[in-house]
Image (tube, rainbow, N blue to C red):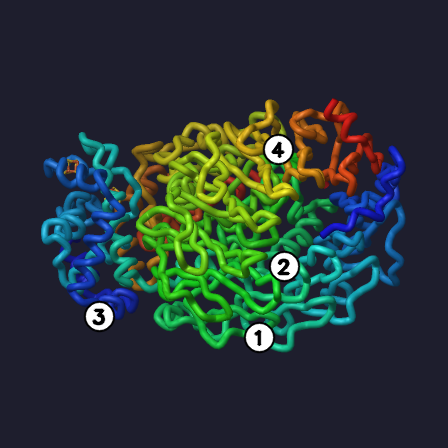
Amino acid sequence: MTNSANWDWGINDKLVADTNEWKDSYNWVEEFYTSPDGEKIAAVVNMDEAEFNVCVNGSAWEIDTPFEKAWALKFSQDNRLTAIISADMAWTVAVDGQLWENTFDYVWDKRFSDDGKTIAVAVQSDGKYGMSVNDVPWEDMYSFITCMALSPDGKMTSAVVQTVDLAQAEVFKFQEGCYTVAPNGKAWSRNFVNAWNMAFSPDGTKVAAEVRHNLYDYTIAVNGEPWDQIFGCVWCPIFHHKKGTVIAPVRTAGAWTMVEDGTVIWDRKFTQIWHQMVSPDGSKLAAVVAPSYGNWTIAVDGKPWDTTFGEMVSDAVFSPDSNRIAAVATENEKYTVVVDGNAWDQTFDMAWKPVFSPDSQYVASKVEKDGKYFIAVNGKLWGKAFDNAWEPAFSPDGSRLLCRTIEDGKYYRRVVPVSDIVS
Amino acid sequence: MAEASEKIEKKIIDEGLETGSKRLTEERIEKVINEVLSGETGARLKSYTDTCVHCGLCAEACHVYLSFNRDPKFSPAGKVKRTIGEMIKRKGRVSPEFIKEASEIASTECNVCKRCAMYCPFGIDTAYMMQTVRRICHKLGVTPLYIQDTAHSHAVTQNQMWVKEDEWIDTLQWQEEDAREEMSNLRIPLDKEGADFMYSVIAPEPKFQPNLIYQAAIIFNTAGCDWTMPSFPGWDNSDMAMFTGDLEIMARNKRFHFEAAQKLKVKRIVMGECGHAFRSVYDVGNRWLSWSMPPIPMIHAIEFYYDLLKAGKIKIKEKYKKSVTIHDPCNVVRGRGLHEMLRYVIHELCENVIEMHPNREHNYCCNAGGGVINCGPPFKKKRVESNRIKADQISDTGAEILITPCHNCHSGMEDIISYFNVDMHIKFISDIMYEVMEKQE
Ligand code: SF4
Ligand code: SF4
């Protein structure tokens, strides 16, 4: 979780950097990224042919030689700046300008734990694949890796790996099962035809994944043991963080429902269910659903909201008190925020994942309209339009909002009373 | 010719069909056929089979029938009779040998091109029926080997060609670096959240034709586009699982594709020059997932180039001089009506355009589409010979260059021009655009 208590909430507006000046110093400046606390803005910059560095608040990282490449720039939740870089023809991770000791033939898929303290990447060297966590590579490497995952607490990694070699078009060998899941790099003893998307139990003892036994029979496997129940299709499982049960949407007889440890728990079916989530207090289970073909909404404990949307519902989030849900909804190519089934009056060209205030009363979102970005709270747009902005964050007491914005190339860290926006 | 084709058919041994059919029992066949017929097809299939009056009007529409000397067994109604018609008539009580043949017919003698449906007075969609046969054969594990391998690739990697995740990103970075020789500040922006569009391609591009990504990058950078490509699975819009009848894997891949775009917060997805992928993202795959339309607008390259040229964002230095003809890909022309936009684009780029006949939505299929070319080497000769009509059609134009904005059409027609000795070269729109456009330094 982001610890925003020690962020500077006592100021109003602060000009952090004038990025216009960067453009004079470099051949080109790539996309901007800002730290969660708003204190830093950074971009990959190019100095010369195949010479790259990272510029933070106007100063480049102090490195001996420029990187041959740098990409996947991102701040961790604890405000460290990370990139995947290539130096001396080898790839590694750079954190605040310091390179990991281990290098690889390739590095990608950088992930962070919720507190930002753990950084995990997928790595490949000499055609062998695995993950590296805080610069410690897995002991076992594989000929193929996909669906990499890092547990929210940063204690576990996992991925789908190939454990049996396959030559071209060996379809029947494939159907005997050549793939499995490797928590912390140790493959389950049992193979599946396919395995995908996994979840970690909150106590760090279990991993659950979608699996396919053959071309038709899908189920969920937990620590390598598949459920007895077979389904026509399944989507990514989650663990109930209080009960420790595994919950997944499954398809039977052409329709979707929700199961918990293999048993159906919703009394109605949908034409689609995915992105299920348990409320913080553990009392409710919600998911994005299509109650009928082409109509999308949120269902809580199997009961859909009355309002539906024609194109998409995404980015759903429970309020801290577990009583409310906000999501992004799309209809006729216009986006809005919908809270507890009620859409905001305005529609936008894009809307980002909404965020609840700590007391669950306010919902804030970054939205885009006519090429400008705005911060909106409870459906009200803050009067200022920005050339760029990042998702807002509430102060721990909920009274203020941290807004990270760019206007005319100037990056500002702004702390705004929520009342200024909603009144 | 009909006799010749029978000889070819008899000689074809496909391991996927042979091994798969040997494992079948008649009980399993009956069960699976009836499950699919009652659980997945409903009124549509029944109305098609009940309505057909066997008038034969659809036959003249089918390039396979025409190319095989009008042998009735290759007509749309003939193929229905030899497959799903018998399955229904015999209430699923058919032999493993029958399933093997039905799979070969549905997978290699029909491109699910839907041309015949336009000529049937009742609008009977033989393609739908052939897809139902493929679905049944998939559920029975009897699918031609090479396309089955491709479906497995989709299942594991979410792309068609077993492209590993690092290979994908590395290819983009390599193309970006190469293209900087030509345009020094060019970028292929990876994972750029909030870009105007995500560009998605089919896996043969990074695997075999990275120059197409290079050309697209030059075009987008020249036009000043705000675009991105995902570094993670979902970048491939292609779909052979749709054609094998593995609809669950099809759906999984489409979910990856659209959720990649959703995660990147782009307003639309522009896709490269591919026809079957358009069918998957615009019609079949999205609908299986309950998205009646793509949840994020899908723009085919034809539409995108049309917009760029109309808006003057790409300017032409000098039009292409060689004579060109246009092959209309079924999935974006009969499936989406992009034929006039296609002509606008090609006339803007080329001086001398010669139409082939018939054209636009009446064009004959390339015979590679519908997954037929993906059934691989065992069926190559049969595939090429069953499109003699296309060879005649393109060679009658006398054009030097054939332009078609579809990968399958390209590969299929490469085989046709080589087998029938047609003196012609094949290009994508982007090949020509890249050649004739004004570029920045
Ligand atoms: S869909 Fe195309 S290939 Fe199939 S029968 Fe009809 S015209 Fe022939
Ligand atoms: S044209 Fe229609 S009714 Fe006539 S044979 Fe063909 S499918 Fe049947």
Q: Identify residue for label 3.
A: B22
Q: Nearer the viewer, residue A367 or B299?
A: A367
Q: Where, quadrant-wise, is the C terminus of chain B in this rendering?
A: top right
Q: Position of residue B50 (x, y in %)?
A: 13, 38
Cα separation between marks 1 and 4:
41 Å
Instruction: Report the mark closest to the observer, 4 or 3.
Output: 4
Dot 1 surroundings within 10 Å: few (below 14), some, or many (20 or more)? some
Instruction: Report the mark closest to the observer, 2 or 3.
Output: 3
The residue located at (89%, 49%) in the rendering is A59
The amino acid marked with disc number 4 is: Met
Where A170 sits versus A293, above or below? below
The answer for which chain carries disc 4 is A
Instruction: Report the mark closest to the observer, 2 or 1.
Output: 1
Ligand 1 is found in the corner quadrant, namely top left
Instruction: Report the mark closest to the observer, 1 or 3.
Output: 1
Q: Identify residue for label 4.
A: A350
The amino acid marked with disc number 2 is: Asp
Dot 3 surroundings within 10 Å: few (below 14), some, or many (20 or more)? few
The answer for which chain carries disc 1 is A
The answer for which chain carries disc 2 is B
Q: Nearer the viewer, residue A338 or B128?
A: A338
Numbered mark located on residue A400 in the image: none
Q: Position of residue B412 (x, y in %)?
A: 37, 51
The residue located at (28%, 39%) in the rendering is B114
Q: Secondary structure at mark 2?
A: helix
Numbered mark located on residue B170 in the image: 2
The residue located at (14%, 48%) in the rendering is B85
